[in-house]
Amino acid sequence: MNTHHFALAALASTCLLASGAALAQDDFQAGSVLVRARAVHLDSANKDSTGLGLAMNNKGLPEVDVSYFFSKHLAAELILTVPQKHTLTSNGAAIGTLRHLPPTLTVQYHFDAPGFKPYVGAGLNYTRFSSVHLLGGAADVKRHSFGPALQVGVDIPLSKQLYLNVDVKKVFIKTDVSAGGAKIGQFKADPVLVGVGLGWRF
């Protein structure tokens, strides 16, 4: 399932549940904590300036986040997953694998709406690349990446403490690529991540 189909399925689920969600809605307050678990589809933009036609595979992955509310409308969210293994290809041919760990911190604004709770967010992503095995060691990538992250989503209350969550993020991840110890260009993964999951409010 590609990202567009995943997003459409998530939107359909949202619409089906939103009609009856107003009965369960309860506002977030200062000090509220929302813990979410999501299934996420990662779709990489694969922008490459090396001339090698580099691309990273798309994949599904688990995601957990914790949001702390400073007020009814303002929250900070820490987004976490486990290191993800990817295959890197050059013009369609596999040249090796690497892992990336991309924790992200966003600040969100939550809107008032009948029956659901939409939000937008922006923040910072840090990605650590590890277990890099490219062309038998002939190629390498820079191990650290910092970049902005943008987010839009909605929480639909299923009960006073349980929420259905649909979330879309654009995360800017880039790394320098080297061969023989010399930089040959830059690879930008810049993925879109579409997630669906549940949230528990404490």
Image: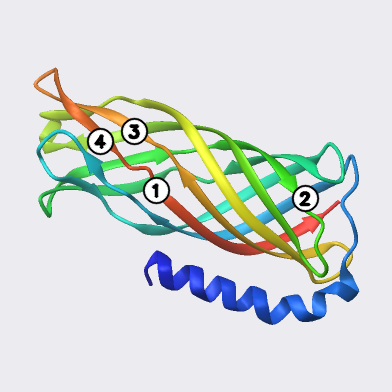
Is the residue under label 4 in contact with that under label 2 (CB below 8 Å)? no
The residue under label 4 is: 187
Q: Position of residue 15 (x, y in %)?
A: 66, 77
> Marks 4/1: CA distance?
12 Å
For numbered disc 4, what is the local secondary structure?
A: strand
User: Residue at horizontal 13%, vertical 18%?
Assistant: 182
Badge 4: residue crowd in 10 Å (few <14, some 14–19, many ≥20)? many
Location of residue 167 in the rendering, given as x and y in whole percent from the top left corner: 59, 57
Q: Residue furthest top?
A: 181
Q: Which residue is mark 3?
A: 174
Q: Earlier in the sequence, mark 3 or mark 1?
A: 3
Circles 4, 1 touching at the beta carbon (< 8 Å): no
Which secondary structure lies at badge 2? strand
Front residue of 142 and 121: 121
- Judge by depth and name the residue closer to the eye, 130 or 68: 68
Q: Are marks 4 and 3 in contact (CB under 8 Å)?
A: yes
According to the picture, the residue beneath numbered tag 1 turns out to be 191
Q: CA distance from mark 2 to mark 4?
A: 35 Å
Q: Earlier in the sequence, mark 4 or mark 3?
A: 3
Residue kind at label 4, given as amino acid type: Phe
Residue drawn 80% across and 65% down?
162
Q: Disc 2 marks which amino acid?
A: Leu
The answer to which quarter of the image holds residue 100 is: top left
**The residue under label 1 is which amino acid type?**
Pro
Scheme of colours in the image: rainbow
Label 1 vs 2, first from the N-terminus: 2
Counting residues from the start of the chain, the first of labels 2 and 4 encountered is 2
For the residues marked 1 and 2, what is the alpha-carbon distance in whole angstroms?
A: 25 Å
Instruction: Please state which amino acid type lies under the numbered disc 3.
Output: Lys
Instruction: Give the CA separation, mark 2 to mark 3.
Output: 30 Å
Instruction: Give the distance between the C-alpha atoms of the residues marked 3 and 1, in whole angstroms.
Output: 10 Å
